[in-house]
Structures are given as C-alpha cells and as structure tokens.
Amino acid sequence: MSETLRVFLMIAVVALVTAGIRFLPFLLFRKKTPDAVLYLGQVLPYSIMAMLIVYCLKGVDFLSGTHGIPEAVSVAAVVLLHKWKHSTLLSILGGTVLYMVLVQIVFG
C-alpha cells in the first residue's frame, strides 16, 4: 500500500468516526432527549468554564513579577464583556487579546 493511499484512508476513517460521533445523538434520541442529557447540557458549560479558569490561573505567582495583574485584569475584562454583550466568543477573544497586550507591551 502506498503512503499516499494510507494517509488518505487514515483521514477518511477519522472523518467518518468524527461525523458518526456528531450524528449519533440525533439517531439515538429521535423521540425524546433523556432528562440526564438535558441536565448535563445546562450544567456542563459552567463546569467547563470553572475548570478553564482554574487551569489558566494555576501557575500565577502573586508574590513575584507583576503579581498577577495581567491575569486579574483579563479575567475582569472577560466577565465584563460577557455581561455586556452575552457573547462567549467576544468575551474569550477580548480577554485573550487584552492579556497578550498586557503581557507583551505593558508589563513586558
């Protein structure tokens, strides 16, 4: 088997598995979505955001350097942007850009 064919088959398998995983819930829950799945749909986004906050702030050292100022300002900006526009994409993008400006230019 040629290397090109092998790579093509690997990509095809990955694409089929990914598509299958995405369509499987629609096939399984045609009539009624179980209450447990609906509950997880309401609770998981907040849980994931909390885990991301802990992960992003776990290495911040408040006793050296900038004392966590860029991180604190960026987290506040994310919260304020989200409360103002209710857009997750805008909140994350705005906070990331602000953090990078603070770290690279202001406190760099």
Image (cartoon, rainbow, N blue to C red):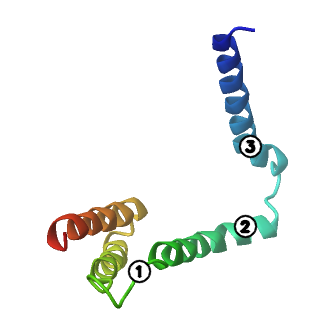
From this view, report whether residue 2 is shown above or below residue 10. above
Q: Residue furthest front?
A: 64
Residue at the spot of label 3:
21
Identified by mark 1, the residue type is Val
Asked if residue 44 lies left or right of residue 62, the reply is: right
Identified by mark 3, the residue type is Ile
Give how far apart the Cα atoms at labels 1 and 3 are: 37 Å
Q: Residue at x 81, y 48 (%)?
A: 30
Q: Earlier in the sequence, mark 1 or mark 3?
A: 3
Which of the numbered marks, if any, corresponds to residue 38?
Answer: 2
Q: Earlier in the sequence, mark 3 or mark 2?
A: 3
Q: Earlier in the sequence, mark 1 or mark 2?
A: 2
From this view, report whether residue 30 is shown above or below residue 99. above
Find numbered disc 3 in the image and state the secondary structure of the residue it sits on. Answer: helix
Find numbered disc 1 in the image and state the secondary structure of the residue it sits on. Answer: loop
Pick the quarter of the image with the N terminus: top right
Q: Residue at x 30, y 86 (%)?
A: 67
Pick the quarter of the image with the C terminus: bottom left
Examine the image and state in which quarter residue 19 appears: top right
Q: Where does residue 4 sit, x and y in percent of width and height?
A: 63, 12
Residue at the spot of label 1:
60
Q: Residue furthest bottom?
A: 63
Which of the numbered marks, if any, corresponds to residue 42?
Answer: none
Identified by mark 2, the residue type is Leu
Q: Residue furthest left?
A: 106
Residue 10 or residue 3, whichever sits in front: 3
Q: Where does residue 6 sit, x and y in percent of width and height?
A: 70, 17
